[in-house]
Image (cartoon, helix red, strand yellow):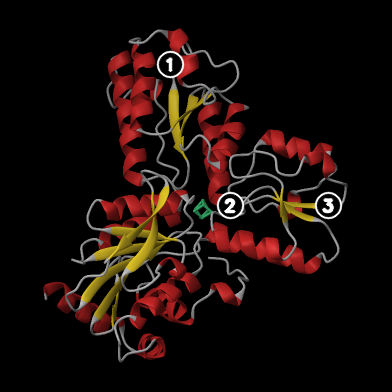
């Protein structure tokens, strides 16, 4: 994969040593078992895959280069470049201003833009309408467009579905930047509707089956369907694409469910289901698949708690939290600063969308066993910060430097053997 120039302060010597070691020992990415960090009284199990993905590194590389190469120019970001507060603040500190918030609400009106101003398009991509507004303002975005190729792939898939006369169902969060962009790119080619989750897929199925009044659709799915959408004719042939960072199991369940609905409605079998349902695979990106797969493997290790590091509005990180929460106490934190002490942690609850404080979150027993991972927009330096903070509570003999030495010299088999040993204890 292409290498990007990411500022060194986002990197971590420890995590880099671990990732390099794992990559060398497992070139085909078949081993999803966690990396075992044994500090004696504290044992940390680090997910096999986490942290900056291709699209995020690409966006960071372009943004920082743009700042460096254009001193004196006005540089704007359309909205948050990625869903990580530290990265966005670092860009702001270097003079970059944001035109919109994450919901698309204007912060700086486009009419203030002048020809020659630079506008960086974030990794999520943007809508055709916004592209047009920027072009009208004389702003050229091609050079500063950091839209992730895996998002572009979803747009291409939607286009292919549309070409075969199917309507497009987008499984995504309707307000998320990426889903708004995908919706816009899909809607110029085909009738398009967004479903947030299985509940909404089931409501949509009621209209397909004719169990609900067509007129109600327009209120129920307000803001989620394309202009001119005809609920009575535009749901006869459908195909599903999804936001790249959804939960894989949710997307698969929704796609399978809608396929069954079409089979029943039109009395189809597997051999002719394509008459009404486009045969497509999900459009989750490789990072979503790797990170979620790594969390499933991580959860096979018995542990006292899990810590997930990332921005609180990060979709891919929230799904990792959801997976962990099903199994054990889970703390979703932005950085090590949320770990106030060995007795107190501040963390985000995705259900109620609020920050809460938990006391006595670390177990009394030794060794404490902690699962650790982070989202695709989280710098590795933050994960190392969390490890540093945790080991400071345990009077550990081993240091981060000792671990770096281990991972630059020890064969992975030794780590795997230690991991198995710890699981069996
Ligand atoms: S999470 Fe996936 S789609 Fe999103 S920026 Fe990263 S690689 Fe691209």
The residue beneath circle 1 is 236
The circle drawn on residue 128 is none
Label 1 crowding class (10 Å Cα cut-off): few <14, some 14-19, many 20+? Answer: some
Q: Secondary structure at mark 2?
A: loop
The residue beneath circle 3 is 117
Q: Nearer the viewer, mark 2 or mark 1?
A: 2
Numbered-mark total: 3
| Residue 346: percent from left, percent from top | 39, 61
Q: Nearer the viewer, residue 366 or 23?
A: 366
Q: Residue furthest right?
A: 115
The residue beneath circle 2 is 148
Q: Is mark 2 within 8 Å of ligand 1?
A: yes
| Residue 110: percent from left, percent from top | 78, 40
Label 3 crowding class (10 Å Cα cut-off): few <14, some 14-19, many 20+? Answer: some
Q: Secondary structure at mark 3?
A: loop
Dot 2 or dot 3: first in sequence order is: 3
Q: Nearer the viewer, mark 2 or mark 3?
A: 3
Q: Residue at x 49, y 50 (%)?
A: 313
- Structural distance between the alpha carbons of marks 2 and 3: 22 Å
């Amino acid at each position: 994969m292409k290498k990007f120039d990411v500022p060194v302060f986002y990197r971590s010597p420890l995590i880099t040593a671990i990732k390099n070691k794992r990559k060398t020992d497992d070139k085909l990415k078949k081993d999803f078992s966690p990396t075992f960090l044994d500090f004696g009284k504290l044992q940390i199990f680090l997910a096999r895959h986490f942290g900056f993905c291709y699209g995020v590194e690409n966006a960071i590389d372009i943004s920082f280069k743009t700042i460096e190469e254009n001193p004196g120019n006005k540089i704007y970001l359309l909205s948050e470049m990625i869903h990580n507060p530290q990265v966005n603040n670092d860009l702001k500190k270097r003079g970059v201003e944001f035109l919109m918030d994450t919901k698309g609400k204007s912060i700086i009106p486009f009419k203030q833009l002048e020809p020659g101003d630079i506008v960086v398009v974030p990794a999520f991509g943007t809508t055709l309408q916004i592209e047009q507004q920027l072009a009208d303002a004389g702003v050229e975005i091609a050079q500063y467009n950091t839209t992730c190729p895996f998002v572009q792939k979803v747009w291409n898939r939607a286009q292919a579905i549309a070409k075969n006369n199917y309507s497009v169902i987008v499984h995504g969060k309707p307000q998320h930047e990426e889903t708004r962009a995908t919706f816009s790119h899909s809607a110029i080619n085909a009738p398009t509707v967004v479903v947030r989750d299985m509940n909404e897929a089931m409501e949509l199925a009621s209209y397909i089956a004719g169990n609900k009044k067509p007129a109600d659709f327009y209120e129920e799915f307000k803001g989620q369907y394309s202009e001119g959408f005809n609920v009575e004719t535009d749901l006869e042939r459908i195909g599903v694409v999804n936001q790249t960072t959804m939960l894989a199991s949710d997307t698969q369940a929704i796609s399978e469910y809608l396929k069954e609905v079409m089979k029943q409605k039109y009395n189809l079998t597997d051999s002719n289901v394509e008459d009404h349902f486009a045969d497509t695979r999900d459009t989750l990106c490789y990072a979503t698949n790797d990170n979620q797969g790594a969390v499933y493997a991580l959860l096979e290790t018995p542990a006292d708690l899990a810590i997930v590091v990332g921005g609180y509005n990060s979709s891919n990180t929230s799904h990792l939290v959801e997976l962990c929460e099903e199994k054990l106490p889970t703390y979703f934190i932005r950085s090590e600063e949320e770990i106030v002490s060995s007795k107190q942690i501040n963390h985000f609850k995705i259900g109620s969308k609020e920050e809460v404080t938990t006391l006595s979150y670390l177990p009394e027993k030794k060794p404490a066993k902690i699962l650790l991972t982070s989202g695709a927009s989280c710098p590795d330096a933050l994960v190392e910060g969390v490890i540093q903070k945790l080991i400071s509570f345990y009077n550990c003999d081993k240091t981060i430097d000792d671990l770096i030495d281990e991972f630059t010299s020890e064969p992975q088999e030794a780590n795997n053997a230690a991991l198995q040993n710890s699981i069996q204890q």
